[in-house]
Image (cartoon, rainbow, N blue to C red):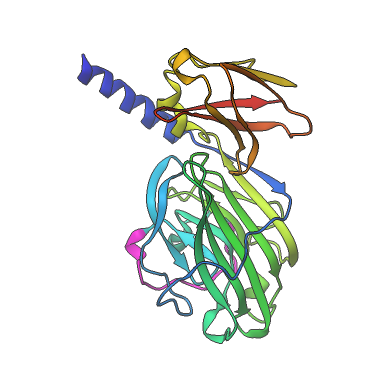
């Protein structure tokens, strides 16, 4: 019976992962520090780094990873076989989705030919912020010269969020070098299956574009799947209504009375915290936007997670 149940769960999970889609939305420009973190070692023009640990489980198009590669051309890849290898600069005439191997299984932040070897003040760093289970891995490309236009500099970030598996691409400055690659750059994501890709509006390879201070969010349809196992059994914890419009109410079993309650948004920012004095509390949304939120409840010997929606 256990084997049959395990087979069913694996089959169900495989089918779900095959159907992962992404929504693309513009979000406020709010980067982490660009010059903070750990420098990516041994990274040169048109190369991939060696494997870099994420620090937490991350799902990309339904496949789970614990490490990635940084491309010196402002992107990251989950194709670990390319470790320390060549990262092509060519983009002219390419649009997503594309069968181009070096764009598969990648987050393009955007993919653009930049030259770390000509960037005396430039840095490519990684940093992890926040606390489990709401950490974020930030990959920063700070003041990197555009290839063949060394007086122009690109600065941007790629952000991976724990548990929600959301991806942010943040661009402080993306100039255009028309003398190379016809000025092309691509901001988007592409799966290991080269027929599936999502691109920010007017940021594909068929458009020449320049921008400053913009951010894009790629939200997967399985955004809260990591919580499902925990959410199967709340052992007496009750949250209602869900979805909620103005107020949620939470009641706890006897062994959790006096818990610390915190509410986090999908970006990993804490929006509410209270030390409960009994087994019930209510939460008013006030000016919080619609979206997915997470409630954590913790005592000295127990911790629970719940997800809910404000609409």
Q: Which residue is at a point 41% across and 52% down the rendered structure image? A: 55
Residue at position x 46%, y 30% in the image: 227
* Circle count: 0
Q: How far across and how far down the image is residue 114, in percent?
A: 58, 76
Q: Give how far across and how far down residue 140 sits, in percent.
A: 56, 66
* Residue 273 or residue 290, whichever sits in front: 273
Q: Nearer the viewer, residue 16 or 259?
A: 259
Does residue 247 show up?
yes
Q: Residue at x 56, y 44 (%)?
A: 166
In the drawing, does residue 264 fall left or right of residue 48?
A: right
Question: Is residue 245 something that shows in the picture?
Answer: no
Of the pair 142 and 127, the residue shown nearer to us: 127
Q: Which residue: 51% across, 68% down? A: 125
171 to the left or right of 80: right
Question: Which is the main secondary structure of the residues drawn in magenta?
Answer: loop
Which contiguous range is marked in magenta? 80-95
Vertically, is 172 above or below 235?
A: below
Q: Hey, which quadrant is residue 50 in on the image?
A: bottom left
Query: Would you identify the image quadrant in which residue 7 lies?
Result: top left
Left or right: 183 in relation to 85:
right
**Considering the image in quadrants, where does the C terminus appear?**
top right
Q: Is residue 110 above or below residue 188?
A: below
Q: Position of residue 275 (x, y in %)?
A: 59, 29
Query: Was residue 185 drawn as part of the magenta stretch in this picture?
Result: no
């Amino acid at each position: 019976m256990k084997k049959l149940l395990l087979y069913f769960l694996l089959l169900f999970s495989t089918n779900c992962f095959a159907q992962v889609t992404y929504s693309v939305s513009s979000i406020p420009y709010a980067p982490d520090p660009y010059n903070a973190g750990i420098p990516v070692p041994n990274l040169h023009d048109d190369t991939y780094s060696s494997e870099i640990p994420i620090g937490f489980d991350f799902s990309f198009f339904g496949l789970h990873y614990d490490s990635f590669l940084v491309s010196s051309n402002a992107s990251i890849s989950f194709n670990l076989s390319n470790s320390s290898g060549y990262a092509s600069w060519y983009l002219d005439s390419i649009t997503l989705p594309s069968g181009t191997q070096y764009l598969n299984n990648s987050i393009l932040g955007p993919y653009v030919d930049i030259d770390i070897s000509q960037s005396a003040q430039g840095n490519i760093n990684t940093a992890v912020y926040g606390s489990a289970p709401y950490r974020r891995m930030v990959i920063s490309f700070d003041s990197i010269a555009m290839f063949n236009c060394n007086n122009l500099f690109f600065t941007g970030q790629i952000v991976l969020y724990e548990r929600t598996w959301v991806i942010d691409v943040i661009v402080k400055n993306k100039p255009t070098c028309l003398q190379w690659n016809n000025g092309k750059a691509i901001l988007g994501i592409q799966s290991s299956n080269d027929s599936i890709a999502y691109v920010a509006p007017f940021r594909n390879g068929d458009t020449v574009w320049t921008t400053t201070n913009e951010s894009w969010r790629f939200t997967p349809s399985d955004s809260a799947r990591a919580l499902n196992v925990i959410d199967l059994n709340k052992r007496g914890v009750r949250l209602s209504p869900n979805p909620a419009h103005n107020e949620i109410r939470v009641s706890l079993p006897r062994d959790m009375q006096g818990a610390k309650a915190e509410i986090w948004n999908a970006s990993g920012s804490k929006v509410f915290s209270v030390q409960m004095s009994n087994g019930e509390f209510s939460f008013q949304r006030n000016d919080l936007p619609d979206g997915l939120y997470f409630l954590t409840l913790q005592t000295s010997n127990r911790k629970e997670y719940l997800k809910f929606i404000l609409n």
